[in-house]
Amino acid sequence: MAPLTPYTYIQCPCSDASTLGRQADSNSPRSPDDDELDDRAFDPRAPRSNYSLYPLDYLNYCEDCQQIRCPRCVAEEIVTYFCPNCLFEVPSSNLKSEGNRCTRSCFQCPICIGPLSVTSIESPPDPSLLAAPDGAPAPHSGPYILTCSYCNWSSTEIGIKFDKSNSIHAQLVKLNNGGTTRLTAKEHRERRKEASQDRLAGPPSALAAAASNGGENNEELDLETQFANLKSFYQSQLADAAPGGSGLSSLNDLGFSSPTSLSRIMSLYTGGTVHNSRNKSRTGTMREALISDEGLQIASLDESAAIQHLHSIDYSETITTEQSTNQPPHLGEVHPHGTSRFASSLRPIPYLLRTKRSKRCPVCRHIISKPEAKVATTRFRIKLVASAYIPTITIRPLNIPSSSTPGTLPPLQPSQFILTFQNPRFETINVTLATPAKTPGRFSSKVTVLCPQFEIDANTDVWDEALKDTSDKTKLRRRGAAGDDGTHQAEAGKIWERGRNWVSIVVEVVPASLRLDLLEATAKEDEDVLEIPMFVRVEWEVDVGGDDVGTAPSRDKEQTEERELAYWCVLGLGRVGQA
Amino acid sequence: MSRRPPRGEYIETDTGNKVARKANLVGTQNIMLGGKTVIQPEAMIRGDLARSIHPSSSSSGAAPGSNTAVAIGRYCFLSRGCCLRPPGRLYKGAFTYTALRVGDHVFIGPGSVIQAASIGSHVHIGANVVIGELAIIKEYVKILDGTVVPANMVIPSFSIVAGQPARVIGELPEGGHEAFELRELYKTVGNNPQPAPS
Amino acid sequence: MSSSSSKRHSILPPISQSGPKPPVQFSSSITIADSALLTGSNPILISSESVIHPRARLDSLSGRITIGRRCIIHERSTLGAVGTSGRITDKAVALGDYVTVEVGASIEAGDTVIGDGTTIGVGAKVGAGAVVGRNCTITARSEIKAGEVVEDNVVVYSNGMRRVDRRGVAELRNKGQARQIGVLRMMIPSNPAKFQ
């Protein structure tokens, strides 16, 4: 098993039941019942802890609430939509009409999801040599195809070629696999209009037509067309049923926007009888779709053709579940009933758009992260990340007895780790640590933090750091000296090392033996990972002298305010070996 | 005795590049280093595979600097055994190599083979990664170990990428941007390496 | 570096030519880089117009190595590697015509055959005794196990998936390969005399 690299995960307060009610005022004095809650140590393996632990990098910080915010609790707002392949921005107005995929020429391979490139058939589409990229003038401008440079799939396998090298999406929409012209929903509608003129007699004759023509009207539709047909069919029925219409029935009330419909629904729920008399008068029902032009699709349950086809083809010509789910929902050739099983029915997948998003604090609604809107820039207008406010904790092994399995911690023997806390703040901070004496869970290991309380000097400016280069070196030398003489021992109550804005301390653990429970059951997945819940409390003082308007600044210039932040984190130290 | 050789393991240039003597640089006249870049032993750069067709002037009298095959920015780190080579392609029916451009603060893991067209700044490429020809990798991208990025793929900013073929498996959090800075790593190698800060 | 490096044309450290110098049979039209690495005791045959990049390694210790016409052997690839499955046979590795072996690929020794027009991708491995057909593509970092057979026109991708290449562009690919060789011959200073 691969050795585990030590990690530190931090719990966002949003998942802590005890803080749920008072997120906004974490500075308020602690009420007595908090102590009860504090007695309950955080269990990193509890089901509730799922998805509440994050590496520091993933956390934001709200300056107004002075609290950690995680990806799960922040409210996101989309700033920009763009295609991850051509990196063009897509206006949000286009999104409503065109959907959430790139409508230019960006496609993924339906076989391997690699990028597809547009290639002229005349030029060699060789994976190792690479033909001309999109739009580049090819030696012969001829029909174009999409090719995958990874798995060598090409759109010729589904019988599709393009006349132009640009706006492939628009061309693909009009092509069926095999190269036949695909009618758009609008064209279908026009065709239906012509057809319906032939049978003006109305629904009964349509029914008769469907019955007499049998399968003829049941041409196979793709999802998009079927939906369009269904929609227009029912819409036309609603229109037909309008007052003064054919008199079939007064179904106008079924439009959800109409006030009568609303009152009818209301009466359904309230049990009122206000409109009962009116409702009784409404006797007509809506007719169901009967032919494919109206959106009816008869499930093809006869799969003998598919089975026949399976006999004649290779396994690799069938599609996997993943390939099938990767298919875009509206471009499927003949899809509605999951009949697509063959590679020949796959369609190139237009790239899903990606977004740039800003984040808001869920409590105070302030923006805590906002990227620049332009796709090309990577700058942020606002970026409040937790690593700029709370200390980073890094774990380094100090003294680990040799174990039977390399890279694991030997059980029942004390191992020592160095925890280094780095202070990102420009104020000196006081850190108080607390861990349960024994880790929660079936295998409880003993934990001792040798120095649970210490002070870390303030962070300094980058320029100060550069100017004080010499002092930095002396510090390094001191560290070197400490490492050289072997007498440097971990002592209780003393910090291990101290630097400009960091302090390291020692934690000693005695891992539990995994054998204890062998009789009961085998260890669950990752139960051998030694995880220590640790409560971190950070206190610092901030200058509030000039900031507050209400107070008189002249009276006390050195007015400071105590601030504190407390949170649970989990230290993953390593896997416990077999005794 | 072993600590005595007069020559260090690295050649340190005026602009602060640290190039291992055991690095395999071919065609150095076509390789541009921005400065403060580390090239570890057995890293290979194919500067000899320069553009053979010039887009505008076909005459050989092109400006000397225009034939750069591999351009690398500042604070890049080329780990042991990686290989950078310009991508080749057929252009108007003729075969030519085109330049490989690498931004600043780009880490390239051991054993990785890079044939991209461009790699933006602040990119981390893990170990044994293959970047296919003419791929474009934008700023702030993390490519995990063993990934195969197919030819022509574009990887947008703030992506975490893995798999064969590569796919975007996650988004980089804003808090992780600092980790791409390679200034500290630069100090830890060379003839007088400094210990890494804790 | 560009300005200061004019004095150092190239900083390739010397190659340690360890072991015996293998008997070679080169066509007069091949291009072989000075820093290619040829070792072993059995013959190495390279047919016309093939290109051997710098630091490519041909090891004939376990048997004869045959390279067909217009092949490109990229840097750091190894033909005749012992690897995990390599074994001693008469013919260690035989490449057909128009074969491309990309950077860092490894073809192990032991009657291993690579068919015409096949591409072995970056960092791919072909085990001993494997027979790869014509016009195949073994994508980057894929592995063909020892003794495996890959039919003609098969693409091996995504770590072991296989499919048939139906593009039918073998001829165009070969044409492209010829063009690439034309360019490489101008770029790679050839020094076949060193190995003869």
Image: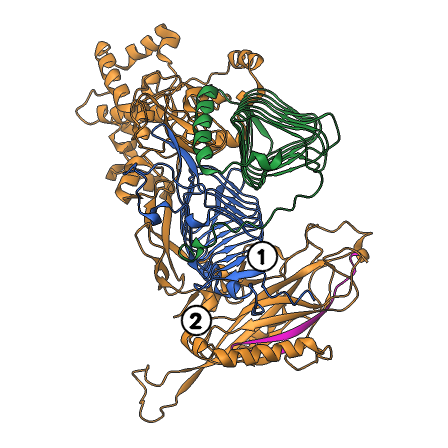
Chain colours: A orange, B blue, C green
Q: Taking A519 as reference, is A82 left or right?
A: left
Instruction: From the viewer's side, name the closer residue of A90 and B57.
Output: B57
Residue A372, placed above or below residue A428? above
Q: Count up the numbered dots.
A: 2
Q: Write down the chain letter for disc 2.
A: A
In the structure shown, which secondary structural element does the residue marked by tag 1 occupy?
Answer: helix
Instruction: From the viewer's side, name the closer residue of A315 and A245.
Output: A315
Residue A471, placed above or below residue A109? below
In the structure shown, which secondary structural element does the residue marked by tag 2 occupy?
Answer: loop
Say which quarter of the image contains residue A166.
Answer: top left
Sequence order check, earlier mark of 2 and 1: 1
Which residue type carries mark 1?
Arg
Which residue type carries mark 2?
Gln
Is there one chain holding both mark 2 and mark 1? yes
Name the spot of residue C96 as percent of width and height, x first: 58, 22
Q: Write down the chain letter for disc 1.
A: A
Residue A69, placed above or below residue A36? above
Say which quarter of the image contains residue C109.
Answer: top right
Q: Which residue is mark 1?
A: A48
Q: Which residue is mark 2?
A: A66
